[in-house]
Image: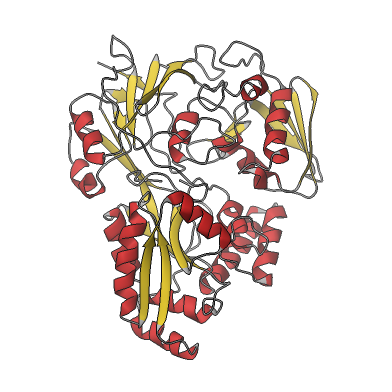
Amino acid sequence: MRRTVRWAGALLAMGLFAACSPGEGVDRGGKDGSGVVAAIAGEPDQLDPHRTSAYFSFEVLENTFDTLVEPDGNLQMRPALAKRWKASKDELTWTFTLRDGVTWHDGSKFSADDVVYSYKRIIDKKLGNAWRFEGVKDITAPDRSTVVIKLKEPMTNLLSRIGGHKGLAIVQKKNVESGKISKRPIGTGPFSVEDYKPGESIKLKANSRWWGGAPKIPSLTFRFIPEPTTALADLRAGEIDWTDNLPPQQVKKLSADDSLKLDSVVSNDYWYLSANEKRKPFDDPRVRQAIAYGIDREAITKATQYGNATVNQLAIPKTNPWYTQYSPYSHDTDRASELLDDAGVTDLKIDMLVTKEYPETVTAGQLIASQLKKVGITVKPREVDFATWLDKQGKGQYDMLMLGWLGNLDPDQFYYAQHHSKGNFNFQKYSDSKVDKLLEAGRSESDEKARKALYAEAARKIADDASYIYLYNPDVVHAWDPKLKGYKVRSDSAIRFRDAELTD
């Protein structure tokens, strides 16, 4: 799922629902103006971290819930609700020791039972992140401050699985069973939900008891402003303090504007094309490769992201320690035509799913149609709402589609679910025994150098077979009032205001 420069909603694969109306008359977090007001591009579909897949929801949830461990600014896993952990020699038993004195927003005490409840809720109800617990044998709480996770086989990336995404947040059983969690969640995070005005805003207040120390701002209000030019105008006018919803074509100009603070980083998100390999002739890798040669990634990136992205022919960006440099495809229409001839394919017509909730897919669809026409391929973009898009993807009712993945940290998360023959998100139905073995080995390999080699080989094979036709890694671009200090843009797209403060 989710997005980055966040002008198109949120990304994918966890899926996301776009926005509502801009709010009016929201004060600046308090009468004294000491709170922060942030503009996001849409309204959360709900605030239950286990059930939502919307990026707009996670922008709020990042500030209200905690995970057992969490990534730091360098994407290394660090203590959060767990203050330390250790793995057994056989790496099949992980023991987590929890922090002392942690409380929920309602003042009740947090314990290991809450962790067990949260994880088993995801597993037993087969919620969206249940795949992250594949290979987990049992989760227990031998006492109030200890959580034990037992595995069926070694899982090198267990920490990133349970801590790299707020969809694995620890929730309160009473809050869930009351049915209030979707609109009035109770977490352990640095802020709690104080007021929710549907279609307008969500106001959070600082949690003075937070284990990481009380936030420096008393409140944080998220306003829902779908139109980027409106968000930018409100930022300039002092109506808001921060936004990630910027007109992409203005980013370069804004970077030279001293009245604003703007920063960007290459994200771990990626966008791709995918052909349905259950439909002929897309089961032939030569046809998929022809598409990969026939498109112009630079032109697609410029048209959809206005250059605020880095072209990449693999999933993992160059800023990530697991990056592999590999670019097997150039924009070569002659080579594309040769591959189609070799495959015996003529007059190919492609039904390409696009959705206005992700405008870049519509823009890209039109451009790709123009590009592939030069090699004798007719692309007909079919625009549907995102719920229909997801349904047709799941049922395999498409020839080709474009979307992206958000929030990956470990290489396993970039490749296994999407390209292993039994992967939960392998909707294109790619299957290669060599790739399966490499991805399986990568999950249990503890030596980092050897592990990187396994994933590099798998990534190259996936690209060669065009299981996904990778396009680019978008930038995370945020802008804020210079009076807002301590805020940092992160490559994992996490929106954290815990260390932010407003100065005079």
The colour scheme used here is secondary structure
Q: Position of residue 344 (x, y in %)?
A: 48, 90
Residue drawn at the location 54% of the way across and 47% of the way down:
409
Q: Quadrant of the C terminus?
A: top left
Residue drawn at the location 66% of the way across and 23% of the way down:
177
Would residue 126 be visible to someone looking at this image?
A: yes
The foreground one among 338 and 456 is 338
Image side of residue 31 versus residue 391, left or right: left
Residue drawn at the location 53% of the way across and 48% of the way down:
408
Q: Position of residue 225 (x, y in %)?
A: 30, 34
- Find residue 380 and report its image quarter: bottom left
- Find residue 331 and report its image quarter: bottom left
67 up-or-down from 270: above or below: above
Residue drawn at the location 64% of the way across and 67% of the way down:
435
Would residue 62 be visible to someone looking at this image?
A: no
Image side of residue 487 versus residue 92, left or right: left
Q: Position of residue 66 (x, y in %)?
A: 57, 27
- Find residue 329 and report its image quarter: bottom left
Q: How many marks?
A: 0
449 up-or-down from 220: above or below: below
Q: Position of residue 446 (x, y in %)?
A: 70, 51
